[in-house]
Image (cartoon, helix red, strand yellow):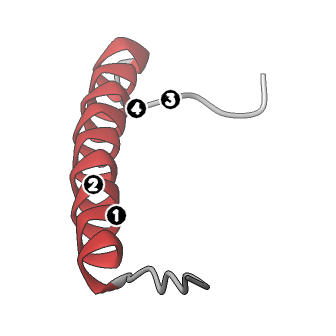
Amino acid sequence: MLDRRNEDVSEEQRKDGAFRIIFDRKFEQELERTLIEMRAEAFVDIKLDL
């Protein structure tokens, strides 16, 4: 054996899982905010030949 872990792997996995959940939630919120902002700034220029 080369080395030993001093920390419980399940605790580390719980922390990683919690981080991923928070990261994913914040990412989705920021993505939605960005898309709303982009839509608000977008415009359509319709030119009709009548």
- Please identify, in this view, whether the residue under mark 2 or under mark 4 is nearer the observer: 2
Asked whether the beta carbons under mark 1 and mark 2 sit within 8 Å of each other, the answer is: yes
Q: Nearer the viewer, residue 25 or 1?
A: 25
Asked whether the beta carbons under mark 1 and mark 3 sit within 8 Å of each other, the answer is: no
Q: Earlier in the sequence, mark 3 or mark 2?
A: 3
Q: For the residue labelled by badge 1, is the local secondary structure a helix, a strand or a loop?
A: helix
Q: For the residue labelled by badge 4, is the local secondary structure a helix, a strand or a loop?
A: loop
> Could you say where residue 35 lies in the image, as x and y percent from the top left?
34, 64
Q: In the displayed structure, would residue 45 be above or below residue 36?
A: below
Asked whether the beta carbons under mark 1 and mark 4 sit within 8 Å of each other, the answer is: no
> Pointer 3: residues within 10 angstroms few (<14), some, or many (20+)?
few
Q: CA distance from mark 2 to mark 4?
A: 40 Å
Q: In the displayed structure, would residue 39 be above or below residue 1?
A: below
> Could you say where residue 44 lies in the image, as x and y percent from the top left?
44, 79
Quadrant of the rendering where the C terminus is positioned: bottom right
Q: Residue at x 48, y 87 (%)?
A: 45
Q: Amino acid at mark 3?
A: Arg
Q: CA distance from mark 1 to mark 3?
A: 44 Å
Asked whether the beta carbons under mark 3 and mark 4 sit within 8 Å of each other, the answer is: yes
Q: CA distance from mark 1 to mark 4?
A: 44 Å
